[in-house]
Amino acid sequence: MIWEVGMRYLTLAADYMDPVLTEVDGGAVSLGEAGLSRDLIDDIISWNADYQEIVRVVPGERRDRLSDIMRLDERGLELARRVASEASPARVRYYSEGLLKHLD
């Protein structure tokens, strides 16, 4: 990856209890500190709440929930795009908690 001066590099992921927005080399960033709109924050919190069913499933049993994971990850990818737009200039990666890997 080529780093651009002034660009924020963030990762969005669902997690136990609270969603995670992290800045590469900077650690966790609160949704409010990221400069996100109230609507987007509410959508991220709702998505994270829906993801809790998957977060609690042990990784070996998640393959039985792939359709749920795919649906949640589609929402997560869209949320990551919205974060990138609102936290501009920013590049936002999405980490699938269900699949335990980054998705592009």
Image: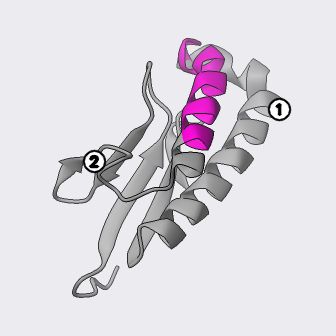
Amino acid type, callout 1 = Ser
Q: CA distance from mark 1 to mark 2?
A: 30 Å
- The residue at 39%/73% (across/down) is 90
Q: Position of residue 104 (x, y in %)?
A: 59, 63
Q: Which residue is mark 2?
A: 29
Q: Which residue is mark 1?
A: 67
- The residue at 54%/12% (across/down) is 56
- The residue at 71%/33% (across/down) is 69
Position above or below: 38 against 6: above
Q: Nearer the viewer, residue 24 or 39?
A: 39
| Disc 2 element | loop
Position above or below: 9 against 33: below
Q: Position of residue 54 (x, y in %)?
A: 63, 20
Q: Nearer the viewer, residue 90 or 41?
A: 41
| Disc 1 element | helix
Q: Which mark is residue 56?
A: none
24 horizontally vs 59: left or right: left
Q: Residues within 10 Å of mark 2 (few under 14, many from 20)?
A: some
Amino acid type, callout 2 = Val
Q: Is residue 104 visible?
A: no
Magenta stretch bounds: 42-58
- The residue at 45%/56% (across/down) is 36
